Image (tube, helix red, strand yellow):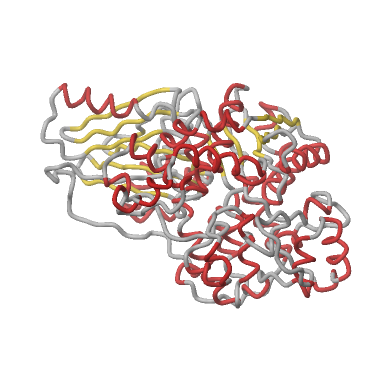
Amino acid sequence: MCGILAVFGCTDNSQAKRARIVELSRRLRHRGPDWSGLHCHEDCYLAHQRLAIVDPASGDQPLYNQDKTVVVTVNGEIYNHKELRAQLKSHTFRTGSDCEVIAHLYEEHGENFVGMLDGMFSFVLLDTRDKSFIAARDAIGITPLYIGWGLDGSVCKQGGLRRWYNPTWYSEQIPSTPYDPLVLRGAFEKAVIKRLMTDVPFGVLLSGGLDSSLVAAVASRHLADAEAACQWGSQLHTFCIGLKGSPDTKAAREVADYLGTRHHEFHFTIQEGIDALEEVIYHIETFDVTTIRASTPMFLMSRKIKSLGVKMVISGEGSDEIFGGYLYFHKAPNKEEFHQETCQKIKALHLYDCLRANKSTSAWGVEARVPFLDKEFINIAMSIDPEWKMIRPDLGRIEKWILRNAFDDEKNPYLPKHILYRQKEQFSDGVGYSWIDGLKDHANKQVTDSMLMNASFVYPENTPTTKEAYYYRTIFEKFFPKNAARSTVPGGPSVACSTAKAVEWDASWSKNLDPSGRAALGVHAAAYEETGNTEAANLMNGSPQKRLEMLEKTAAVA
């Protein structure tokens, strides 16, 4: 990931102003430690801090069209840049950078070119001929982009904000396409293969859960045929972190052994995580509880990964939102509400998991790629009749069954059966259940009952309702005291990462609002409280072996 900064309409274009732009851009250098660039045209500045992944030798930014009248500063990767270059036969390119194609596409197609890009990106483009500009972000918000205005409003120009990505699912209408496991599998394999595009060492973040294990399995199968294998070898590197004895580290080690990867297992203590909290909140720029819980181990792991010389990782974010993988989806009352909840979750990813994955890794100059959020894959997965995604214990369908079933290949298995059908663990839980408990204990020592009682007076907007949330808010406010920063953070009640609407699915959840998966009472195998043991709960809460036995009995459903 890179860091980008663009400032337009500066009333002061003195050397002092340029120095100020350089200083502000330098604050993003953790995102791009490899090189810095700045382009100035009259009262417009485009700055860049580069993390070199593709064409490290000559792809420094800002980038230009042939006559340098179009300037662009980009954060991200354009996976189809070679195909796009082939369509621009009359254009001359200066570098091998995947991002240079943006300036040439604009020259050829105007602002309507954005939908042609297949990748993750945030960019700002300046046309010096009329001083018009475009600021754009990828469809989901895998990479962040913030827009602000100066006190004199001089940055404002004619134009406005509009959504360039308008797939059918965005309207939340209920789709009806039949489920085809081979189509779904093929689309995901294609998404992973795209993300093997790199000129630097890379690996896969492997928690041992379904999503990261599938990423590792597909990447491992296809790495030998990728160009990256010529430079870095055909053995995939995988990385995992957790407290000693955590569920994730054990499962990840088993998956790595099965796939034959070169596995790197890291451990951290609760105190090490607590000590890192201030730095984590500074980098991820949020006070959302579940994001901070999950970002901290990811932040620590990214530092270890960077120390090994690795600059790019592939990760499993996005699957739970697309397939309804969070445990609270067990209580979805019908397919209509199930589908609408998945749509809402995808639309909000830039505030949660995308923010975590991007900023936790880029804090140490590491880039995270997420194949589940591939445009083509999302469109295919979200066009499937949601009846197939519904969690149906009576039919042997656990959460994300259609994804599990798509990769359940008896002749050429991708993963061991019990890993393929392992119950969902949120990352903040999977690193070790005592991690969240330790965070709560620490917050209870920092925040008094009186402080929490008066929270609405201290923080009238998005008021924290727990001592843990209050503690994170105090750290956030220390770094980002202005309302502009505060307003970028979402709020509202949630259970096991649900939206506020989904809390209504089970009356008991309103009394146990916590973003941990263990708050899904009656669903998670290690739920916070004991609940009645119905037949469905026994299936879902049982051991992986018990769930497999039930699934094998109903395998004919597929």
| Residue located 66% across and 38% down the image | 204
| Residue located 58% across and 29% down the image | 271
| Quadrant of the image occupied by residue 385 | bottom right
- The answer to whether residue 470 is left or right of residue 235 is left
| Quadrant of the image occupied by residue 283 | top left
Residue 544 visible in the displayed image? yes
Position in image of residue 389 (x %, y %): 66, 69
Position in image of residue 155 (x %, y %): 18, 44
| Residue located 60% across and 26% down the image | 304
Camera-nearest residue between 195 and 285: 285
Q: State how many labels appear.
A: 0
Rendered view: 387 above or below 440: below
Residue at the extreme front? 450
- The answer to whether residue 270 is left or right of residue 128 is right
Position in image of residue 485 (x %, y %): 31, 44
| Residue located 34% across and 34% down the image | 479
| Quadrant of the image occupied by residue 247 | top right
Camera-nearest residue between 292 and 239: 292
Camera-nearest residue between 327 and 255: 327
Which quadrant is home to the C terminus? bottom right
Position in image of residue 74 (x %, y %): 39, 38
Residue 81 visible in the displayed image? no
